[in-house]
Amino acid sequence: VCSLTVTSRATIRELYDDARVTRLTAYIAMAEAMAPAIGPILGAEILTFMGWRWNFILVFTVSGLALIGLVLALPESNVTPNRRALHLGPVLAVYGRLLVTRDFIGPVMAAGLVFGGLMLYITAAPFLLMGALGLTPREFSQTQAAVVVGYIVGLVGASRLVERLPQIALLTAGLAAVLAGGVSLLGLALAGFTGYWAVVAPFALYTFGIGVAMAPL
């Protein structure tokens, strides 16, 4: 599943010119932003009315149809295949060079830590909000929508400022918001505030920061 994030962008880059790559990448980013909001809402309704097994049946069906569509409609994008691309030696050599390149490793570490926090929340939120705080599946889906709204607001707002402000200013502001959201979440938990808004509001600020930082990229 994770390979789709890489292969979709690589395929687009190989098939289209820069202008269309930018437009299609924006569509993918929009879908990735909406999925965590729409998915839990749809999943909660399926769980309520049809049972949890139907969530897996739906994923299997949609994935199968997508795979068939790819096989039938998507052309091979790599017109100059490199037979040594998957050989272990060259791959490790490239990674070795990247790991000692400061201009690469710094931004990658920052992005990895930020998205690591996001993945941690997505993984732990169902257990925390439904298990510990007692939210119903439908109420939980609404919390996910609130968190994604923070991301969209940050992304749209920063996108309008990209041409007016230096990229480093937006990146710094976005990472500052991420830090503030994470520290607020931790501080509220340590202070004993464990209610609904003590979790959702700080993480909405966290995702808002991700949206601001992503706009220049």
Image (spheres, rainbow, N blue to C red):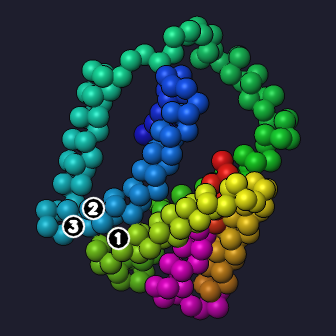
- Counting every numbered tag in the picture gives 3
| Residues tagged 2 and 1 counted as in contact (Cβ below 8 A) | yes
Residue depicted at 34% across the width and 70% down the height: 141
Give the label on residue 180, or none: none
State the residue position of label 1: 141
State the residue position of label 2: 43
Residue 111 place in picture, x, y as percent: 68, 52
Q: Quadrant of the rendered structure where residue 135 is?
A: bottom left
Left or right relative to 67: residue 198: right
Q: Residues within 10 Å of mark 1 (few under 14, many from 20)?
A: many
Give the label on residue 45, or none: 3
Secondary structure of residue under mark 2: helix
Q: Nearer the viewer, residue 64 or 51?
A: 64
In terms of sequence position, does the residue under pointer 3 or pointer 1 come before the other?
3
Q: Quadrant of the rendered structure where residue 86 is?
A: top right
| Residues tagged 2 and 3 counted as in contact (Cβ below 8 A) | yes
Instruction: Give the amino acid type for the residue marked by disc 3 in the picture.
Output: Glu
Q: Residues within 10 Å of mark 2 (few under 14, many from 20)?
A: some
Q: Residues within 10 Å of mark 3 (few under 14, many from 20)?
A: some
Q: Is residue 116 one of those drawn in magenta? A: no
Instruction: Give the amino acid type for the residue marked by disc 2 in the picture.
Output: Gly
**Which region shows up in magenta?**
190-208
- Report if residue 207 is visible in the image: no
Residue depicted at 78% across the width and 40% down the height: 104
Q: Is residue 196 above or below residue 87?
A: below
Left or right relative to 27: residue 157: right
Residue depicted at 78% across the width and 56% down the height: 166
Residue 139 place in picture, x, y as percent: 32, 78
